[in-house]
Image: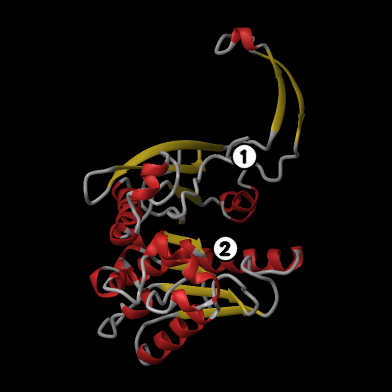
Amino acid sequence: SSYTQPSTLHLADASKCGEEGYIINKLKSLPHMFDSSDLEVSQHFATSKDGTHIPYFMISKKGIDLDSSNPTLLYGYGGFEISLGPRYATTVGISWLERGGVYVEANIRGGGEYGPEWHQSALKENRNKCYEDFIAVGEHLVARNVCSPKTLACRGGSNGGLLTGNMLVQAPDLFGAIHIAVPLLDMQRYHKLLAGASWMAEYGDPDTDDWKDFLYKYSPYHNIDEGREKYPNVLLTTSTRDDRVHPAHARKMVKKMWDLGDGKDWPVYYYENIEGGHGGAADNKQQAFMTSLSYDFMWRALTGNLP
């Protein structure tokens, strides 16, 4: 499978690997769920703050105009040695690509794309590298004229919600819309809530000098800039019954932004599903709703059609 090709089983001749005629016959395939006939996938590299080359995949219409106007969605995770890579992008295809948008996945440090070292290079005091990598990819897209900050959105959930939460406070002028899903945001108390204590090897221990030495720097809840007059459009979503990342993270962040942003241009939207666990939905109907909510919010924000 790939971003545009559903999982397919082929009969092949291993003795002819790489040669013409290697693939003998296509046996079966899962159905195509969106029109990918006019799409292309490309890989690019951005340079992070410390000089490391950060790969990313971009899926777009063939021959798109590089005029900075393309609604572009940047997705990332960057943690726990979880790798992002080519797989059939059903939901993205239907919700974003068929509308004419550009979809990008960033293979930032903290993930496992280049093995354990790629993950370990962004633990604890080096966690900033995840966020610097993601910002570098966003800036590279803007520099290539794929999009502009007004037409660039980012999305992430769980640890990826911590990532996009940091985009809100560290690079608010780079994005026109941000979706922060089932996130960690208060890194001073994360270890006291639900499964949080099991992640201290990844982030650090707030009850030690880790807090003042580095954890504070990437705790979005503690880095909201009350002096800013404008933040990008942001949607926070969570689940009342999330048993992994406590919904208090999202609730507190929204309340603080609503309070500090009173009278300012801080467009903060919030949705809490009362069912579902860490996935944010209890069944396919709810999952479809949550997915539609996210993609429609970002599309409307980037095209100037938010209510």
Question: Which amino acid, by three-letter code, is at mark 1?
Answer: Ser
Image quadrant assignment for residue 5: top right
Precedes in sequence: disc 1 or disc 2: 1
Residue at 44%, 81% in the rendered image: 253
Amino acid type at mark 2: Tyr
Closer-to-camera residue (213/186): 213
Using the image as rendered, state which of residue 187 and residue 68 is in the foreground.
187
Kindly tell me whether residue 293 is visible in this rendering: yes
- Quickly name the residue at label 2: 295
In the image, 304: left or right of 19?
Answer: left
Q: Residue 36's mark?
A: 1
Would you say 30 lies left or right of 49 here? right
Instruction: Sort mark 1 into few (<14), some (14-19) or many (20+) by Cα contacts within 10 Å.
Output: some
Q: Position of residue 254 (x, y in %)?
A: 46, 83
Is residue 52 left or right of 252 when viewed as pictured?
A: left
SS class, disc 1:
loop
Residue drawn at 37 percent across, 78 percent down? 188
Outermost residue to the right: 28
Residue 125 image offset from top left, x and y in percent: 28, 61
Dividing the picture into quarters, in which one does residue 130 lie? Answer: bottom left
Q: In which quarter of the image is the N terminus?
A: top right
Q: In the rendered image, is residue 303 in sight?
A: no
Left or right: where does residue 294 sit relative to residue 154? right
Q: From what the image shows, is residue 42 above or below residue 81?
A: above
Circle 2 packing at 10 Å, graded few (<14), some (14-19), many (20+), is some
Q: Nearer the viewer, residue 215 or 228?
A: 215
Q: Do the residues labelled 1 and 2 touch (CB within 8 Å)?
A: no
Q: Where is residue 8 in the image (x, y as percent from the top left)?
A: 70, 31
- Residue at 38% across, 72% down: 232
